[in-house]
Amino acid sequence: MVQVRKRLKMQATANDKILLAHGGGGQLSEDLIRQVILPRLGGHGGQALHDAATFQAGSQWVCMTTDSYVVKPLFFPGGDIGKLAVCGTLNDLAVSGAQPFALSLALIIEEGFPIASLERVVDSIGRTAAANGVQVITGDTKTVEAGSADGLFINTTGIGLKRPGVDLGFDRIAPGDKIILSGTIGDHGMTILSQREDIGFQSQMQSDCAALADLIGQCLESGSEGVRFMRDPTRGGLAATLNEVVRATGRSIEIQEELVPVNPTVKAAADMLGLDVFNVANEGKVVAVVSQDTADRCVDLCRRHPLGRQAAIIGQVKAAVQAPVVEMVTRIGGRRIVQMPYGRDLPRIC
Amino acid sequence: MVQVRKRLKMQATANDKILLAHGGGGQLSEDLIRQVILPRLGGHGGQALHDAATFQAGSQWVCMTTDSYVVKPLFFPGGDIGKLAVCGTLNDLAVSGAQPFALSLALIIEEGFPIASLERVVDSIGRTAAANGVQVITGDTKTVEAGSADGLFINTTGIGLKRPGVDLGFDRIAPGDKIILSGTIGDHGMTILSQREDIGFQSQMQSDCAALADLIGQCLESGSEGVRFMRDPTRGGLAATLNEVVRATGRSIEIQEELVPVNPTVKAAADMLGLDVFNVANEGKVVAVVSQDTADRCVDLCRRHPLGRQAAIIGQVKAAVQAPVVEMVTRIGGRRIVQMPYGRDLPRIC
């Protein structure tokens, strides 16, 4: 009895402070949002678990999404915090079926941060926004004392107009639907990690950081009826995205390990660090759940796009026999459950 | 010559890093935004110096504004970082002539931050949003390692619908227009400072942190034609707001010191610390420039509202004789120029 009390007390102590894992995009993140944050927002935060919220302005449906970026290091192969912030926010709008058109930009800068670095980051923001046809329309700049922040944190909030005729949502997913992945997994997270830990693979990896609005727009325009749901598998990786689908729909998902594209260097680096590449963040990939008869056309379209050359159908939605799960058929023909990541693998990857 | 070179080099060294003053809302903030940030956003950031940007969604004009909050301490007499974030963002929308209706909420939380404190802050956000009829519709949570941030930083981005028939802007300001201030100045900044420095006035000061949308809405509904421009005098205080008007319009402003309401304790605390209360931040006040024939009605309306009981006409717009300036007639009948604050007085007051 004393032991039980002690254990309970230890749990309470561990749970009364924020852990890094609370920001990991896995189970602990979801618990924090569902148990601590949403109930206090008066039932108003009902959309807050989606990538973007939707509101009506006159007759027009508008999407809004927000993300803060705390990636470390600020500059990495394939991108920087500025490009990441613009791409990440645009992708959240795109997977919600919106055409992005405006961003806000809020900077929190540590005293002593080199202005030359700030210039590089803002250059990157300007370039990425322009390349994707969006404008930075409003902003904010705050400074904090040396030691009170780590260089630079960015918030971008994005606005997009809902594409007419596009209807995406968990509720449209049905057994038989195919799961499309637009390319290799794990590149972003492993690149960031390789910059922080000396694991000897640095030169061969590059973040996949990219804005997917054009690719996604093409898929939606060609067969919007058959596209049920889309999500960019960022924090928590492919495993978190597929598990969210399973939880929200009550359906199971079966994927084939051999069909999931992975850069061999990324796989080797993940294995070496004991990480599951399915849990590692991506910043330029989309998971789409589409109807059977749309799947091939959608993959073809992706493969003709520079950002989707390795797109593949990796699995399908199934009616759940018992509890709904994400199940993977391994390369050697075995089966394993792909769990929702708990959340502590990789801090500050976005 | 050697001395000159050395001095130039020292300047270069001082200018190549971010200073706390870059976030102070004064001259250095403006320089950073105008010289470093806006040119890199491809001409797209043209609206970025305003409190809010406007875009068209279908036939509806929509306002958007963003602010990050890094106030220290997180809890203070009269409010906390959560209430401050909601009020500050709603006020930026309100002074832009919009009716706020939605917010995004992005949290950056330091590892080890007490969940009980997070709960207090989110409670405050929920309560303040609900009291003002706005919904938190989307959000984001990031965590960073202990030592990489100072407890909690918040970004709120707000959306409002432009009020029909309301046209506010620097270009509508004309000589003869009156300057209305909705109440006492300096309360927020001095309260925050008193919590950080032991100046012995703590118990007698309270932040004015409040959402002004209702007060502003009443003024606009009663005489929108005569209301030319509004601004909430936050960082940089009343001095920064009036100087912005002068710079943007090329008109001068004359104010009467004795007409500007100041809480005596706030004045005494500012004097003791060598601060000019005109430069100190407010978080529940509005400065309105209104036509002569609207001014009395507008002040009356403010005074009947709980948040505007001490509203007063404090001065007027004049044609500039030489360079446009903010001039103050002092209590003893002298005259002094109210300068744009340089920016280093009070870090992290919002």
Image (cartoon, coloured by chain):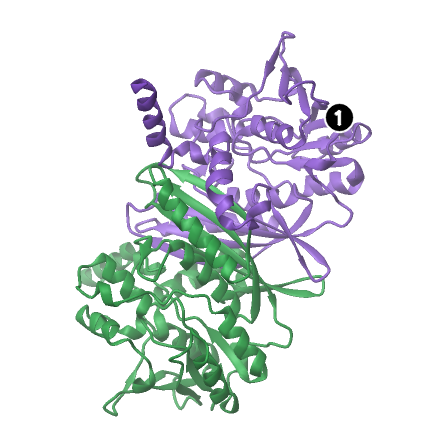
Chain colours: A purple, B green
Instruction: Name the residue carrying label 1.
Output: A175
Residue A344 lies, with reference to residue A124, above or below; the image says: above
Residue A56 is left or right of residue A30, and the answer is right
Residue B82 x, y percent position in the rendering: 41, 54
Residue B87 versus residue A309: which sits nearer the camera? B87
Residue B221 versus residue B193: which sits nearer the camera? B221
Q: Give the residue drawn at x 42%, y 58%.
A: B83
Q: Read off the chain for label 1.
A: A
Q: Amino acid at mark 1?
A: Pro
Residue B86 x, y percent position in the rendering: 46, 58
Say if residue B16 shows up in the picture. no
- The C terminus of chain B, quarter of image: bottom left
Seen as rendered, the residue at the extreme right is A293
The mark tally for this picture is 1
Residue A192 lies, with reference to residue B214, above or below; the image says: above
Q: Give the image quarter of residue B208.
A: bottom left
Q: Give the residue drawn at x 52%, y 50%.
A: A42
